[in-house]
Amino acid sequence: MKILLLFALFLSLPTSADSYQNIVIQEFGGPEVLEFLTRDSLPEPGPGEVRLRVLTASASFTDVMVRKGQYGGAPSEPPLVPGYDLVGVIDKLGPGVKNFELDQRVAALTVWGAYTEYAVRPTTHLVPVPEGLGDEAAVALILSYTTAYQMLHRVAQVSEGQSILIHGASGAVGSALAQLGQVAGLNMVGTASTRKQGYVRSLGVHPIDYQTEDFVSRARELTGGTGVDAAFDAIGLDNFKRSYEALNASGELVLYGFYTATLAGEAGSMSSLIGEFLGMKWQQLLWNWFPDDNKTTKFYSIEDTRTAHPDWFREDLTTLFELADSGQITPNIWKTLPLGDAAVAHRYIEEHAVKGKIVLRVSE
Ligand SMILES: NC(=O)c1ccc[n+]([C@@H]2O[C@H](COP(=O)([O-])OP(=O)(O)OC[C@H]3O[C@@H](n4cnc5c(N)ncnc54)[C@H](OP(=O)(O)O)[C@@H]3O)[C@@H](O)[C@H]2O)c1
């Protein structure tokens, strides 16, 4: 009888209710460093913060950079929880929080820290998710679509009928640029590998095979010899120069990443290079590098843009939610995997297998 009573007492202990899991990187490296860990107690929100029960996160190329220690916006030393964006339900309000309520569904750009069952975020970083929009669609819009939207409308300020060149048009940001470019009435050409030509065409983009074709001459041909009004390039230094050649006389080049250098770099080896470019030195480099003509070159970073214009981030993500909620766009989700398969998702990304976005389901 005593044993039975003790067993019943053990079952009623509250510890498991307060524990939760997240994915932690103990050292920078390959996908195998993404490990599930159990935490003993839930995080507590401070003043102006809320605790979220996370529903979905996404797996992105930027998370791969964080995992490899190549991303300046994340801690330079592990341990750390990766994950650039999430959708969650508010399950506890911190002291003084008035503008959000319990059970409300919200989105957040976390930069790191989204691969978790529970997270604490400041309310200034939250954007409400409309009731009719699914958790998976909503999370797919945060990093990749906001990047695409802001580059199109805040940086290049495109207008209907203009032509653009999208590099990596099959990827998460590239396919978002394509979809939003269609909504804006743009003529689009885009680079992709041979096997993804059909997918890029299905997005309303004239595909250029970067493995077999010269994209500069093809982009010029496809725009009647003049070149494009704007080019969006996150591929790498050699590509940037060629994209500049593909512009028309007053075209704009928008740079937003260093894909090939990142992919080639060993864990921990690229942080100073990327940090240098993401700092102010890139400007100097680009001004010296590109000729003095009527073309322009700008660098975009979602994190820096949000820091400088937090209102833009909230407005633009709200606009994207409305576009999706009203059926004007449908986020390009390639696969949804459970959070525990984050390593599988990272492998897909590094093998160039993905078309669009990978979503991670954290809880229902
Ligand atoms: N600045 C910012 O705020 C910001 C925000 C988000 C992302 N980014 C950057 O944007 C880049 C793309 O991110 P993502 O999430 O879209 O990655 P992604 O989903 O992995 O897509 C990138 C795609 O580029 C294609 N690609 C590879 N080499 C190429 C080449 N030489 N020419 C043309 N396409 C090539 C690959 O497809 P195929 O080779 O199979 O065609 C790949 O799927 C990354 O460098 C990321 O760091 C920057």
Image (cartoon, helix red, strand yellow):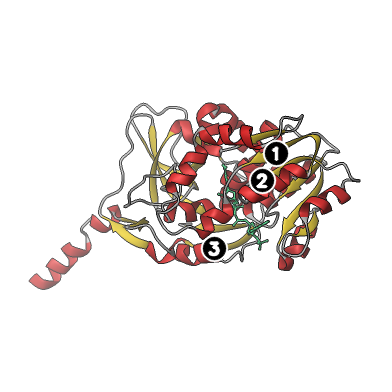
Circle nearer the N terminus (2, 1)? 2
Q: Which residue type does callout 1 highlight? A: Leu
Residue 219, horizontal then vertical, whole percent: 82, 50
Q: Where is mark 3, residue-wise? A: 350
In this view, the residue in front, 327 or 112, is: 112
Residue 123 showing in the rendered view: yes
In this view, the residue in front, 55 or 125, is: 125
Q: Which label belongs to residue 23? A: none
Q: Where is mark 2, residue-wise? A: 240
Q: Where is mark 1, residue-wise? A: 253
Q: Is residue 206 left or right of residue 61?
A: right
In this view, the residue in front, 23 or 293, is: 293
Estimate the spatial distance between the alpha carbons at disc 3 and disc 2, rounded to whole Å: 21 Å
In this view, the residue in front, 82 or 190, is: 190
Q: Residue furthest right?
A: 224
Q: Nearer the viewer, mark 3 or mark 2?
A: 2
Q: Which residue type does callout 2 highlight? A: Phe
**Going 41% across and 48% down the picture, which residue do you hit?**
113
CB at disc 3 and ligand 1 closer than 8 Å: no
Circle nearer the N terminus (3, 1)? 1
Residue 359, horizontal then vertical, whole percent: 55, 57
Estimate the spatial distance between the alpha carbons at disc 3 and disc 1, rounded to whole Å: 26 Å
**Going 35% across and 56% down the picture, which residue do you hit?**
24
Q: Which residue type does callout 3 highlight? A: Glu
Residue 259 in the image: above or below residue 319: below
